[in-house]
Image: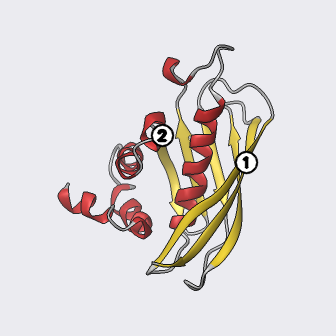
Amino acid sequence: MSKLLAKLVDPSQVGTLWNMLSALPGGGRLMGRLIGRMAPYTGTIKAEVLELQPGRARVLMRDRRGLRNHLNSVHAIALMNLGEMTTGVAMLASLPPKTRGIPMRLTMDYLKKARGTITGTCDCAIVATNDKQELDVTGELTNEAGETVAKIYAKWQVGPA
């Protein structure tokens, strides 16, 4: 376990970590927990990584009372947190070695009340160099019926670590 935690020191190793965990029973949940240790606020949604490869991520968030608002739907900020995590792991898995990324702007369109399990999906460009640049990344959050409940737009700045 200490070797796994050591990999979190360098967020660009998220793809390597996923490759180690994805074949294990509960590997997606463990991956979500480890990301939550790296970014503690992100850990509050207790998400599970379903898929991660360069250029693509799918992350699941189960509905629970602690994520609800006064309208008995998933809170807007929990959805934003899932969107940031989804675009973030997709971007990190798409970076070349010795490159880091940071979100510069996050915006979200809330399209309908979110209830039940929500899945975030992000497809993004695979970054070829660690030259400093800004990249626009879009993600989508869907409910169990496959309906889009929100869209996230993230601007990431990437560059040398």
Question: Image quadrant of residue 122?
Answer: bottom right
Q: Badge 2: how crowded within 10 Å, few (<14), some, or many (20+)?
A: many
Query: Which residue position holds label 1?
Result: 107
Of residues 70 and 25, which is closer to you in this image? 70
Q: Earlier in the sequence, mark 1 or mark 2?
A: 2
> Is residue 125 depicted above or below 119 in this figure?
below
Q: Which mark is residue 95?
A: none
Tell me residue 130's x, y (percent).
55, 83
Point 67% across, 65% down: residue? 124
Disc 1 vs disc 2: Cβ atoms closer than 8 Å? no
Label 1 environment density (alpha carbons within 10 Å; few <14, some 14–19, many ≥20)? some
Percent x, y for residue 141?
68, 41
> Residue 153: percent from the left, percent from the top?
73, 53
Q: Quadrant of the C terminus?
A: bottom left
Residue type pointed to by label 2 = Ala
Residue farthest along the left direction in this orientation: 2
Task: Give the image quarter of residue 117.
Answer: top right
Q: Secondary structure at mark 1?
A: strand
Instruction: Report the residue at 53% width, 35% height from top.
Output: 61
Residue named by callout 2:
47
| Residue 153 shown left or right of residue 23 in the figure | right
User: How far apart are the alpha carbons under marks 1 and 2?
Assistant: 20 Å
As drawn, 70 above or below 100: above
Helix, strand or loop at label 2? It is loop
Q: In the figure, is residue 33 to the left or right of 138?
A: left
Residue drawn at (32%, 64%) of the image: 9
**Residue at position x 48%, y 35% in the image:** 45
